[in-house]
Amino acid sequence: SVSDLHFEDITMVKVGYPIIIDQVYCPWNLCKPDIPSLVKINNVSFKNIRGSSSTAVAVKLVCSSKVPCKDVVVGDINLTYDGPEAPAAYSQCSNVVPSFQGKQSPRVCA
């Protein structure tokens, strides 16, 4: 299990995936995509994260279909996209229902 991770007051400058939980990460296609992660992730927060993303997906919260993430908090996020892929930053979410505090730009899990 992974728990009690807190990221706060961070300025990003052209960072790929500035906010990320990715439980389907599979480098070099050496994984079995039909077998979900069994790592339990809970009590994670991302607060006051600002700056720019080099990827259009600025917030990626992709959790396991078998063991969804719990108690994820997103607060006061202000990230812009600085690259050629899309007109604006956006979020990608699955198997997580985060709670929100303050503003989110881009909107998270919308």
Image (tube, helix red, strand yellow):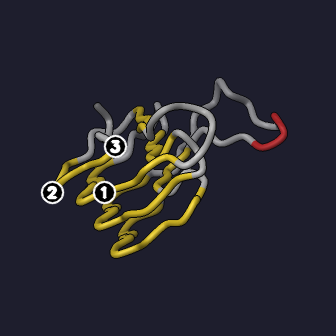
Q: Residue at x 36, y 64 (%)?
A: 49
Within the image, what quadrant is residue 35 found in?
top right
Q: Where is 69 relative to 92, above or below?
A: below
Q: Residue furthest top?
A: 34
Horizontal and vertical percent for residue 70?
31, 49
Say what secondary structure mark 3 lies in.
loop
Q: CA distance from mark 2 to mark 1?
A: 8 Å
Q: Residues within 10 Å of mark 1 (few under 14, many from 20)?
A: many
Which residue bears the numbered disc 3? 106
Which residue bears the numbered disc 2? 102
Tell which of 105 and 41 is nearer to you. Answer: 105
Side of 103 where 53 appears, left or right: right
Label 3 with label 2: CB-CB less than 8 Å? no
Tell which of 28 and 75 is nearer to you. Answer: 75
N-term mark: 1 or 3 = 1
Tell which of 29 and 78 is nearer to you. Answer: 78
Q: Amino acid at mark 3?
A: Pro
Side of 25 where 89 appears, left or right: left
Q: Residue at x 26, y 53 (%)?
A: 71
Label 2 with label 1: CB-CB less than 8 Å? yes
Q: Amino acid at mark 1?
A: Ile
